[in-house]
Image (cartoon, rainbow, N blue to C red):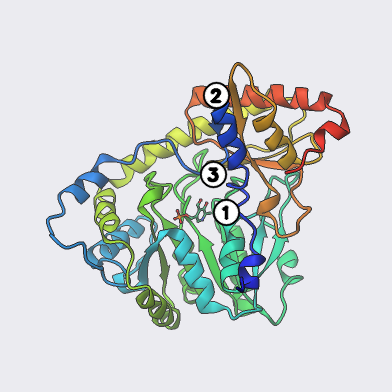
Amino acid sequence: MNISERVNNMQASPIRRLIPYAEKAKKRGIKVLHLNIGQPDIKTPQIYFDYIKNYSHNIDSYSHSAGIVELREKFCEFYNYYDVNLSSDEIVITQGGSEAIIMSLSVIADPGDEVLVVEPFYANYKGFAGMVNVNLVPVSTTPEAGYKMPEIIDFENKITEKTRAILFSNPCNPTGAVYSKNEIERILKLAKKYNLWIICDEVYREFVFDNLEPFSILSFGDYSDRIIMIDSISKRYSACGARVGLLATKNKDFHREVIKIAQARLSPSTLPQIGTIGLLSLGREYINNIKKEYQYRRDIVYEELNKVDGLYFKKPKGAFYVSVLLPVDDSEKFVKWLLTDFNVNGYTTMVAPLSGFYVAKDSGKREVRVAYVLDDEKIKLASSILAKGLIEYDKLTKEEKLINV
Ligand SMILES: Cc1ncc(COP(=O)(O)O)c(C=O)c1O
């Protein structure tokens, strides 16, 4: 029977691809410190579970296709803090930010259309684009430049008559770069000039460090008719399993069309939405504390990685990731080797090879993403394992390094 080209062409998640090797290591009794995935170790606030426990309906029914109205209203209050005025009918609650991006691409692009994406980018964008047969066209950033936003001319050079949108995350997964209001405004002007959509993924919005102030792209009111903002509770409230995200837009045409898709899949899960109403009552104090925790970890990871010879990276300003250039030819092989052939007193670590975060196969081959989602002691231990691992790996012959991934 046939398997579609669509899925044949999709890559397995680069973040999860090496997990079987981690599982085998664990079976051998090795403890693996996971700095490879964006699953925070911070507890989901109790109020999330309490709201679900206290839900008194005796049928777990569908919700409104755009999500429970009370939840959407709560999100509107949440965005007021960023000088963003949304009404509940400008928000669609989705199964995580992931579904919001898939829906957005489905609405704005036809098969074969192109979306410019700031590269390296959240690896699953490739999967999302693949599902709807949209081609991602990379506009690259580099480790040497601290992954700063490309120049406008770099975007312009990639625009064709098939270009429909520009997609990026701010703060950026996987680089930890944070784009300023000026940089965002330049992109918005460009989008206006070429009549493009902007899909701005703000799932890490609040995690910005060194006194940077978080903002939302929707605060640029003049451009709001071309903005689709993506959000999620996964990271902010450490509630990845809830699968609650949203898209927000002021564009009525987009909203009318995206609702068709939202209705076709009936509704997002009801109970996690109830829990999220609880989370949104937590206020800024909760968010500020979490942000402080990540800034603390960022500082530790920065300090520890600085002790490791041969690494190249700049201090990230946001999210909970840092992308690092390693002194190896192929970071995926090195990451695999850490799992199959290396340990320090029964511990090893796992980071994410960055090649899967690029469109072109050979890009990012020497980079990895480190997610600082573990506590300080574990981060220190994992960094020292990485350092020792690099020293040992360097001693291997070329042939020994050529293990297949
Ligand atoms: C930049 C970015 N966008 C979207 C997502 C998807 O998040 P979720 O579907 O859990 O809301 C992630 C998850 O890691 C992410 O890093």
Q: Give the residue type at disc 3.
A: Gly
Task: Please tell me whether mark 1 sits on a helix, a strand or a loop.
Answer: loop
- Between discs 2 and 3, the one toward the N terminus: 2
The quadrant of the rendering that contains the C terminus is top right
Residue 67 is situated, as x and y percent measured from the top left of the image, at 30, 67
- Between discs 3 and 1, the one toward the N terminus: 1
Label 1 Cα crowd, 10 Å radius (few <14 / some 14-19 / many 20+): some
Query: Of discs 2 and 1, which sits in the foreground?
Result: 2
Residue 70 is situated, as x and y percent measured from the top left of the image, at 22, 63
> In this view of the protein, which residue sits in the foreground, 86 or 175?
175
Q: Residue 29: which disc? A: 2
Q: Give the residue type at disc 2.
A: Gly
Task: Please tell me whether mark 2 sits on a helix, a strand or a loop.
Answer: loop
> In this view of the protein, which residue sits in the foreground, 337 or 78?
337
Q: Hey, which residue is sitting farthest front in the picture?
A: 1
Query: Of discs 3 and 1, which sits in the foreground?
Result: 3
Q: Which residue is mark 3?
A: 318
Q: How many circles with numbers are drawn on the protein?
A: 3
Q: Residue at left 31%, top 72%?
A: 65
Residue 299 visible in the current orientation: no
Q: Residue 160's quadrant in the figure?
A: bottom right
Q: Give the residue type at disc 1.
A: Ser
Residue 213 is situated, as x and y percent measured from the top left of the image, at 47, 47
Mark 2 and ligand 1: say if the CB distance to the nearest ligand atom is below 8 Å: no
